[in-house]
Amino acid sequence: MAENKKAGAFDIRVVIAALVGIYGVVLTVLGIVEKQPEIDKAAGININLWGGLAMLVFAALFVLWARLRPIAVPTEEETTEQ
């Protein structure tokens, strides 16, 4: 009986985490360098900063989920036996 392989980088959760993480980094940087008049337009809340940080946390949780519960991909030998 052959061993199951892990999906690794091809796991859709890792791809989603990478995309959300990239957007999160961009928003966080924009939030850090934001001018005060732009912040005042959003009722004094730095939306870019908080949104970016939330996206980074979301991406980290997705990566953690993918690492703790990896998807097992059946090998070719297992699929032919069934």
Image (cartoon, helix red, strand yellow):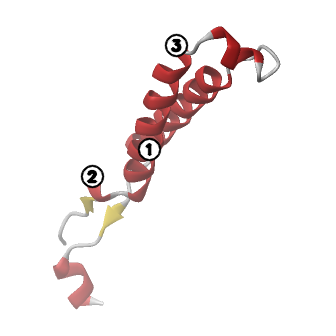
Q: Nearer the viewer, mark 2 or mark 3?
A: 3
Q: Secondary structure at mark 2?
A: helix
The residue pinned by badge 2 equals 9
Q: CA distance from mark 2 to mark 1?
A: 11 Å
Q: Residue at x 44, y 36 (%)?
A: 21
The residue pinned by badge 3 equals 32
Q: Could you say where residue 9 lies in the image, as x and y percent from the top left?
A: 27, 52
User: Label 3 is placed on what type of residue?
Assistant: Ile
Q: Residues within 10 Å of mark 1 (few under 14, many from 20)?
A: many
Q: Quadrant of residue 68?
A: top left
Q: Nearer the viewer, residue 27 or 60?
A: 27
Label whose residue precedes the other's in the sequence (1 or 3):
1
User: Label 2 is placed on what type of residue?
Assistant: Ala
Q: Nearer the viewer, residue 38 or 66?
A: 38
The residue pinned by badge 1 equals 17
Question: Is residue 36 depicted above or below 2 in this figure?
Answer: above
